Amino acid sequence: MPIGNTQPSVRPALAGRTGGPAVDPAARRRPARRAGSGGGLRAERLAPYILVAPAVLIIVLLRLYPLLLGVNFSFTGDGTRNGTAVGIDNYRELLTDPLFRTALGNVGWLVLLLPVAVAIPGLLATFIYLRVPGHRVYRSVYFFPAVLSPVIVGAIFNLLLAFDGPVNAVLGAVGVPPTDWLGNPDIAMFVVVGVHVWATFGMSLVVFLAGFATLDSALLDAARVDGASLPQVIRHVIIPGLSRTIQFVFVTTMIGMLTSMFGLLYVMTSGGPEGSTYLPEYYIWIQQGQMNRPALASAASTVLFVIMLVVGLLQIQLLRRAGKES
Amino acid sequence: MSHLRRGRWLIALPMSLLALATIYPLLFTANVAMKTRRDYILDRFALTDALRWENISTAWTSVGMGRYFVNSLVVVTSSVILLLLLGSMAGFALSQLRFRGSSALFLGCLAGLFVPFQVIMVPLARIMADTALIDTYPGLILVYVAQFLPFTVFLMTSYYRGVPPEIIDAARIDGNSIYGVYRRIMLPLGTPALLSVGILNALFCWNDVLMSLVMMPSAEHRTLMVGVTSLRGQYSDDIPTFASGVLIAAIPVLVVYLFLQRQIADGVAAGSTKG
């Protein structure tokens, strides 16, 4: 917008502040500019909306509206019953589908493993904060896998975890018999989760370190002067001081496990062996893309969304409780 | 205090082993990518006897990684430019301008943060198919922009909140329109945040596989990460070519990481402390 246009638009506002009578003579003296300023004023009033509109439109049309559409869709049928209302049939089918039950069971495992996935970067960040020899190097080295795509990570670990691959070779050297890491339904899911943790703990580490930067170092010094041991320092100084950061990492790690393991599953196991590595997101993709069951997939999407809402609400609950305590 | 100090050296050992475990997988892959098939089968650990760049060029040309690479580059660049433009426009308005409904609009943008792609995959694919945008570059770009816009708007809004309103008032008195303030003041002032958010968005888009898989079904439109997944079936008996393909996909990220590590970490940290 040309600069000349904007001059009058500021004026009415200033004139308005000085009082009503002052506006009229000015307007009468320059009628053309007054008209122009009216248009400019309208344009100025609209400007914030014009700036926000593209972002809001995209988010509403391609994020919020599809959410409603999907929930609606989950109550209709697939195939020959396409488009007709079927009530909760899709949800009933989900509950009886062994693959979806495995997926939910695996979500349960993720919840159980969550404290470990949070504790590892938390401990490492503590050590880096306490200036373990070489702490600068660790920070950048540990963060590095976090920038790699799950697809690349998965492809690399396919090589490493092959039956005749390096991992088994190293373990063989210390007398551990070779394991079919990705072919054994009892352990495949844990292997994939382990790789996910390997690939993402650097993210949480950086978040923890940002939290440490806000920690009052005087408390830490005091604890040291009092001769506190490391576990005592962690329990009585670091955990209370970082409670918000810890909660944030809990939630982001859980959401990461629920929504960013698709690439690993797709490349490493394709849901196998025997469907043991299904997660809801993989199930949704299979039903939508491979089985041509979009309505069933929508029902699974809705279930995943509810799980994520529960995680989010629990977080708010925890934050409130922590707020009351302190 | 002294036992803490001694403990540090004890802790440094497992930490350096972990550091090794963090880097080794990629070094192993790079080494394998330089080997011949025979070498790999005979001994997968030994250092390669020569740098066989021809493996990389095979993956680039005959496997088609080059084509996928260009596809990714086009989609990622366009998405990031759009994200930064729309995100900074909205961030400026939501942080510095007073207008009716601004907090509702901000909350609307934030709500997008809680809707992962997996949850809206089916209806979104349908919308894209209905508007003939499925399997097109603009379609995938739009999906990426929609995916990462809530986060971008959120970060830009909180960054621009730190700009003193006096600067904007002064620019207005100097005769700038609101758009002029955006272009001449806010965009240059936002450079550090735009850089951080831009790099993060570029990484997210570059690394994505699910959205691309759903929105770009045809083989010639594949992005690089989908190309990597297709390597697995085709080259399962030619591991060096497979590893070369993986390396092609990893190298750009590696280079970005080496040079812009601080911005990436800052972006992640900003997202957490402002949340």
Image: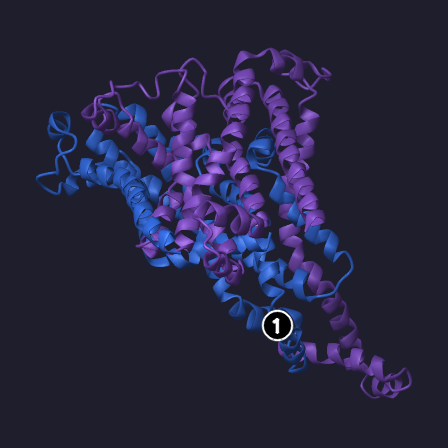
Chain colours: A purple, B blue
- Chain letter of the residue beneath label 1 in the structure image: B
User: x, y (%) of residue A234?
Assistant: 49, 47
The N terminus of chain A appears in which quarter of the rendering? Answer: bottom right
Residue, disc 1 = B181
Residue at image coords 38%, 37%? A198
Q: Nearer the viewer, residue A295 or A31?
A: A295
| Residue A174 versus residue A136 in the image, above or below | above
Residue B222 placement, left or right of B89 = left
| Residue A94 versus residue A159 in the image, above or below | above
Residue B34 placement, left or right of B174 = left
Rate crowding at label 1 as few (under 14), some (14 to 19) or many (20 or more) other CA atoms within 10 Å: some
Residue A227 placement, left or right of B248 = right
Q: Is residue B199 visible?
A: yes
Residue at image coords 38%, 28%? A267
Residue at image coords 37%, 26%? A268
SS for dot 1:
helix
User: x, y (%) of residue B273?
Assistant: 56, 55
Query: Which amino acid, by three-letter code, is at mark 1?
Result: Val
Classify residue B247 by image quadrant. top left
| Residue B151 versus residue B159 in the image, above or below | above
